């Protein structure tokens, strides 16, 4: 998990709290916290954080950036540092504007989907996106099917998303990765997407995402609302897997086409819309 804006600290607290409350897995989990901002306030929060769960190990990283480092450079260098320092077999980066909502062993089902693809060349989006993104041409998807042990939408085009779950050694397969800068802010993602296409990676949306990737314009209001919550209360109230599966069965686009649950679906369930 990484954070780049000091004003979003309440959202990081909410994300980490939702991870502790919702993510269940049979194997030990590792949480890597990265300060990609250089802010003392952010790193002090990270340094003081203590996970309440015994099955989760925590690594805390604070990369050093020269003055004037472009935000895209800091972001991508933080991503690469987290990959290098992580020890797990699977990896996903999350920013503070995400929240886990569904309680259960969803990670296991996502891993089953990855392993069901030849050579494990697959990525699974962890979070429900804003609904309009599901209508974009580069996010078009096929009807759902069972992949591994759960229902997945296979996307028709491959692009890389660091917020998706994948085998951590995928980044090793991609070789030396160019780091984005002010002149080429998308250089890293464009390189990773090109490599993923060349290597034949498959991209999936789960019918039941683990949570929500909140809209950018919601960020400031979300931080203010989180500050008013009681200790342990989440911005979006968590739900069980059975309730999430029922809700997912009612999510349609046009022409009776099923779609993955969206950020708005979760926000409505939580009374935020």
Image (cartoon, helix red, strand yellow):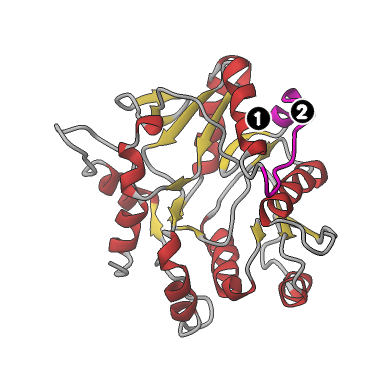
Residue 202 on image: x %, y %: 51, 23
The span picked out in magenta is: 169-183
Q: Residue furthest left?
A: 255
| Residue at the image point whose x is 75% and y is 33% from the top | 177
Q: Secondary structure at mark 1?
A: helix
Q: Main secondary structure of the magenta part?
A: loop
Residue 201 on image: x %, y %: 56, 21
Give the camera-side residue of 216 and 224: 216
Q: Pointer 2: what residue?
A: 172
| Residue at the image point whose x is 36% and y is 43% from the top | 133
Quadrant the C terminus occupies: bottom left
Q: Residues within 10 Å of mark 2 (few under 14, many from 20)?
A: few
Give the camera-side residue of 116 and 179: 179
For residue 174, above or below residue 44:
above
| Residue at the image point whose x is 26% and y is 46% from the top | 246
> If you read the primary sequence from the N terminus, does the residue marked by circle 1 or circle 2 appear first?
2
Q: Is residue 5 magenta?
A: no
Q: Is residue 182 magenta?
A: yes
Residue 200 on image: x %, y %: 57, 16
Q: Residues within 10 Å of mark 1 (few under 14, many from 20)?
A: some
Q: CA distance from mark 1 to mark 2?
A: 13 Å
Give the camera-side residue of 23 and 258: 258
Q: Pointer 1: what residue?
A: 191
- State which quadrant residue 95 falls in: bottom right
Q: Secondary structure at mark 2?
A: helix
Left/right of residue 160 with respect to residue 57 in the rendered view: left
């Amino acid at each position: 998990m990484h954070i780049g804006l000091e004003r979003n600290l309440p959202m990081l607290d909410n994300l980490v709290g939702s991870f502790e409350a919702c993510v269940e897995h049979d194997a030990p989990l590792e949480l890597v916290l990265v300060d990609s901002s250089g802010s003392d306030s952010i790193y002090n929060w990270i340094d003081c954080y203590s996970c309440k769960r015994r099955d989760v190990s925590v690594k805390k990283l604070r990369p050093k950036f020269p003055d004037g480092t472009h935000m895209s450079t800091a972001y991508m260098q933080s991503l690469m540092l987290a990959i290098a320092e992580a020890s797990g077999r699977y990896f996903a980066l999350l920013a503070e504007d995400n929240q886990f909502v569904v309680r259960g062993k969803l990670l296991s089902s996502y891993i089953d989907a990855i392993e069901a693809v030849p050579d494990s060349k697959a990525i699974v989006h962890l979070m429900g996106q804003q609904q309009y993104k599901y209508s974009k041409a580069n996010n078009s998807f096929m009807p759902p099917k069972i992949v591994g042990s759960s229902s997945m939408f296979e996307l028709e085009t491959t692009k890389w998303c660091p917020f998706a779950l994948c085998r951590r050694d995928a980044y090793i397969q991609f070789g030396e990765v160019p780091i984005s800068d002010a002149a080429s802010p998308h250089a890293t993602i464009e390189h990773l997407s090109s490599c993923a296409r060349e290597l034949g990676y498959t991209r999936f949306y789960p019918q039941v995402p683990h949570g929500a990737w909140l809209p950018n314009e919601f960020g400031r209001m979300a931080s203010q609302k989180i500050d008013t919550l009681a200790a342990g209360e989440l911005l979006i109230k968590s739900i069980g897997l059975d309730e999430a599966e029922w809700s997912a069965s009612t999510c349609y686009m046009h022409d009776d086409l099923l779609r993955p649950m969206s950020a708005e679906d979760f926000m409505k369930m939580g009374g935020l819309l």
